[in-house]
Image (cartoon, rainbow, N blue to C red):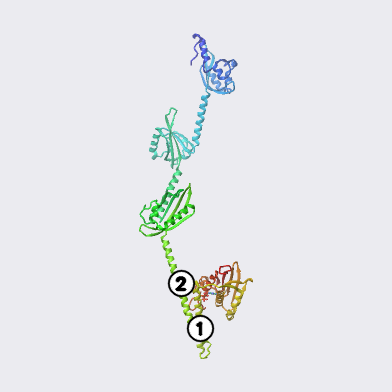
């Protein structure tokens, strides 16, 4: 405490009063009852009141808010006991504006050491306060930022003891801040200590390190991968007092990278082990290749040592048989112009052994950022090509031999018919037994010769007709035919057989328009054949019905009988040449197995279709349709 010097010891009391008066600090003096007895100029300036206005008043007028009892008591007690009170208060000027002051209140003694007055000095510290507040706000903001950052932020002192540990660190590592503050950084695994210490040394020497990938430990013992950024923390004097670290958890990213690498490895080994080559190329706006890739499989495809082709398309194309190159280039260009569309080309190459191989390449272009990327694959199709060629050869051979067979059959049939007509003609004359020289047995033999001859002729005629069709020599002669009339024409021919077997026969025509455009001779042949079979395979007292109607653009005719029926597994076969349900030598029904084949050929010549529905023991229905508007009609 520095009490004012005794005035009596001073030559001039005015010196002291001048000092107080001129002081840049505000000085207010009260008596022991705290009534203002003096205010210097600085205090008048500070508070905006003149001494005259406040003379005799208490300094409470300066307080922004009435002082709390505790503060008041503290001030009174301090100064009354002869001590100096120091503090900070929020004051108010005369104009009502607030400001902070730093205040010092001290007692004034008389010669005998009695307190006779109190002197208070005030200094405006509003600016300082504002700076402090601002600093505090910034500190709070930074703390909040650190706490709420999604990145794990932690700070350590120079010995790696934790001093900052934000919420994300708690979340990512599992330790709460209470558990780690003051402790050695627990996230460094044992095997990472050396690396940590090296890092620490670098940062403590002033270095900032960013994006450093580390492996760190969680509280549960599991590991995580982080991208670490560390920088030194400086105190006010510029000395490093610790290290601030922020770490992004990149475990998922690492796992993803690992999976990707794994997938790529797998893909690569698949490429490597497959007899296939994948390739890609980037083409710029001018159509130039920017980069190209050809997988290793290409060397196997070309029977070349590994790495011969590399990623060089030119190298590859040098193996292609030259006359394919323009076509390949055309297709490639076309593919680039039409992104998303598949381009494919087959071509021959000369492999490493000098042998020709067939390859097939296909790919697709994608447009991105003005560039076109083409992805594709190439496979060896030599086997398929060879098989295809053998097939084509076999087909040509088969067609040739079939033609030869047809021609042969036509020739043979023709040659057979001439003598056969003679046999039939002469046996017919003989069968009349005009001379009466033949006995019954001989007559029977002659009629057998006649019957067999006719049968043979029928068969030869059928073969001849079929051969003609197969040779493409048979033509349709289309005319208007009334199907109702055609049915009437059939009746007299079949009547004798109908009567012999006591069969019922009916022709049902649906609708009045029964006109069709067909080759009449062939139509009659079809009907004779189907009705003939129906009679042949239907036991006595059965029935045969012809049904005809229009179905859409077709004219549909069916022949239904109540005969022996056809087993399911034979129903398709019977339309083939020489196919019979019973082909044994002891079969009950005569026939050549040619009739239905011929019928089918005739129907198909009319652009129609034929099929059978049948149940063994119940009967069969043969149905065929002929379009009304086909080009033949
Ligand atoms: P086929 O001269 O033997 O009658 P088709 O080609 O006309 O020769 O007939 C082939 C076979 O189809 C016949 O042998 C017979 O087994 C069977 N078939 C044809 N029509 C009928 C039918 N209406 N009922 C039962 N079976 C039939």
Q: Position of residue 18 (x, y in %)?
A: 52, 13
Of 451 and 603, which appears nearest the observer?
Answer: 603
Q: Tally the numbered discs.
A: 2
Provide the secondary structure element on which disc 2 rests. helix
| Crowd class of label 2 (few under 14; some 14 to 19; many from 20; radius 10 Å) | some
Picture quadrant where residue 330 is located:
bottom left
> Could you tell me if residue 14 is visible in this image?
yes
Is residue 593 among what the camera can see?
Answer: no
Residue 74's quadrant in the figure? Answer: top right
What residue lies at 46% left-to-right and 79% top-to-bottom?
415
Q: Does 197 sit above or below residue 65?
A: below
State left or right for residue 528 relative to residue 288.
right
Q: Nearer the viewer, residue 588 or 172?
A: 588
Residue beneath the point at 50% across and 80% down = 457
Q: Is residue 86 above or below residue 260?
A: above
Q: Is residue 108 left or right of residue 302?
A: right
Dot placed on the residue nearer the N-terminal end, 2 or 1: 2
**Does the CB distance between marks 2 and 1 fall below 8 Å?**
no
Residue indicated by mark 2: 403
Tell me the CA gap for discs 2 and 1: 30 Å
How far across and how far down the image is residue 339, in percent? 49, 52
In the rendered image, the quadrant that contains the C terminus is bottom right
Label 1: which secondary element: helix
Mark drawn on residue 424: 1
Q: Nearer the viewer, residue 628 or 199?
A: 628
Residue 158: % across, % down: 41, 32
Q: Is residue 147 above or below residue 514?
A: above
């Amino acid at each position: 405490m520095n009490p004012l010097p005794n005035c009596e010891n001073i030559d001039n009391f005015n010196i002291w009063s001048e000092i107080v008066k001129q002081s840049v600090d505000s000085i207010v003096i009260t008596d022991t009852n705290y009534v203002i007895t003096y205010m210097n100029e600085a205090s008048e300036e500070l508070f905006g009141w003149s001494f005259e206005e406040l003379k005799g008043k208490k300094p409470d007028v300066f307080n922004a808010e009435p002082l709390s009892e505790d503060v008041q008591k503290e001030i009174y007690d301090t100064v009354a006991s002869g001590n100096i009170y120091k503090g900070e208060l929020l004051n108010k000027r005369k104009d009502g504006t607030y400001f902070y002051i730093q205040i010092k209140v001290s007692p004034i003694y008389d010669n005998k050491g009695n307190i006779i007055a109190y002197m208070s000095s005030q200094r405006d510290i509003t600016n300082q306060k504002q700076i402090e507040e601002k600093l505090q706000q910034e500190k709070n903001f930074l703390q909040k930022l650190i706490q709420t950052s999604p990145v794990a932020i932690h700070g350590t002192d120079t010995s790696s003891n934790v001093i900052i540990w934000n919420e994300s660190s708690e979340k990512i590592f599992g330790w709460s801040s209470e558990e780690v503050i003051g402790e050695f950084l627990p996230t460094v695994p044992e095997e990472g200590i050396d690396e940590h210490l090296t890092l620490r040394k670098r940062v403590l020497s002033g270095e900032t390190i960013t994006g450093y990938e580390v492996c760190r430990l969680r509280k549960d013992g599991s590991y995580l991968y982080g991208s670490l950024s560390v920088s030194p923390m400086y105190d006010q004097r510029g000395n490093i007092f610790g290290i601030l670290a922020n770490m992004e958890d990149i475990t998922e990213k690492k796992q993803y990278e690992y999976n990707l690498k794994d997938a790529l490895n797998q893909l690569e080994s698949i490429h490597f082990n497959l007899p296939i080559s994948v390739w890609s190329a980037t083409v710029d706006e001018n159509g130039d290749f920017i980069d190209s890739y050809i997988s290793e499989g290409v060397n196997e495809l070309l029977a070349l040592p590994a790495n011969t082709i590399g990623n060089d398309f030119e190298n590859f194309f040098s193996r292609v048989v030259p006359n394919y190159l323009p076509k390949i280039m055309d297709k490639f260009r076309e593919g680039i112009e039409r992104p998303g569309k598949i381009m494919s080309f087959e071509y021959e190459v000369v492999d490493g052994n000098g042998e020709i191989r067939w390859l097939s390449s296909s790919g697709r272009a994608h447009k991105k950022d003005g560039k076109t990327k083409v992805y594709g694959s190439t496979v060896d199709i030599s086997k398929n090509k060879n098989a295809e060629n053998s097939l084509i050869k076999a087909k040509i051979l088969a067609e040739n031999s079939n033609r030869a067979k047809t021609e042969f059959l036509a020739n043979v049939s023709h040659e057979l018919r001439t003598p056969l007509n003679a046999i039939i003609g002469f046996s017919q004359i003989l069968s009349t037994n005009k001379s009466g020289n033949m006995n019954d047995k001989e007559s029977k033999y002659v009629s057998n010769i006649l019957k067999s001859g006719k049968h043979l002729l029928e068969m030869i005629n059928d073969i001849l007709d079929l051969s003609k069709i197969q040779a493409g020599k048979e033509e349709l002669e289309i005319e208007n035919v009334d199907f109702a009339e055609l049915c009437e024409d059939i009746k007299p021919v079949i009547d004798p057989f109908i009567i012999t077997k006591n069969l019922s026969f009916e022709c049902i025509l649906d609708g009045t328009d029964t006109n069709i455009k067909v080759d009449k001779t062939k139509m009659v042949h079809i009907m004779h054949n189907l009705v003939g079979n129906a009679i042949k395979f239907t036991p006595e007292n059965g029935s045969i019905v012809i049904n005809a109607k229009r179905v859409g653009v077709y004219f549909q005719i069916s022949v239904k009988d109540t005969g022996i029926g056809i087993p399911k597994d034979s129903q398709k076969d019977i339309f083939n040449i020489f196919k019979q349900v019973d082909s044994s030598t002891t079969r009950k029904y005569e026939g050549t197995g040619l009739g239905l084949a011929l019928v089918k050929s005739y129907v198909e010549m009319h652009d129609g279709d034929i099929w059978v529905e049948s149940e063994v023991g119940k009967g069969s229905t043969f149905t065929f349709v002929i379009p009304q508007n086909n080009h033949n009609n």
